[in-house]
Image: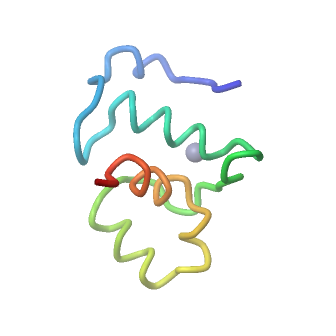
Amino acid sequence: MIAIYPHFCTSPEAQLWRGCKVLTLIHECTHFTDVFDSNDGMYGISIRLSFWAQTNPDHAIRNADSLTCYVGFEE
Ligand SMILES: [Zn+2]
């Protein structure tokens, strides 16, 4: 089950570097225990997340937004 805040309904379908439906769904799916069993150590898809990940690699590997970036922006 995924609980979605009502703002989700008015979010863009997909876009880079901002909140959107695709990234929200990816984020939420990473929390499932049979997917990545991720946590929310650091929120936000931004350059700040990248700097945090470099100094916290043990946490970043299971961080929902880090995984969201990996899945959502993989070319
Ligand atoms: Zn989360």
Task: Please state the quadrant of the image where ligand 1 appears.
Answer: top right
Residue 48's place in the image compared with 64, above or below, is below
**In the picture provided, is 38 more to the left or to the right than 44?**
right
- Please give the name of the residue rendered at 54% of the width and 70% of the height, measured from the top-left corner: 60
**In the picture provided, is 45 more to the left or to the right than 59?**
left
- Where residue 25 appears, as percent x and y from the top left, is 49, 32
Front-most of 74 and 5? 74
Front-most of 71 and 19? 71
Picture quadrant where residue 29 is located: top right
Residue 29's place in the image compared with 64, above or below, is above
- Where residue 7 appears, as percent x and y from the top left, is 40, 21
Q: Quadrant of the N terminus?
A: top right
Q: How many marks?
A: 0
Front-most of 72 and 75? 75
- Please give the name of the residue rendered at 42% of the width and 22% of the height, measured from the top-left corner: 8
- Where residue 49 appears, as percent x and y from the top left, is 38, 66
Q: Quadrant of the C terminus?
A: bottom left
Q: Residue furthest front?
A: 75
- Where residue 43 appears, as percent x and y from the top left, is 46, 54
Residue 9's place in the image compared with 13, above or below, is above
- Please give the name of the residue rendered at 35% of the width and 71% of the height, measured from the top-left corner: 50
Identify the coloring.
rainbow
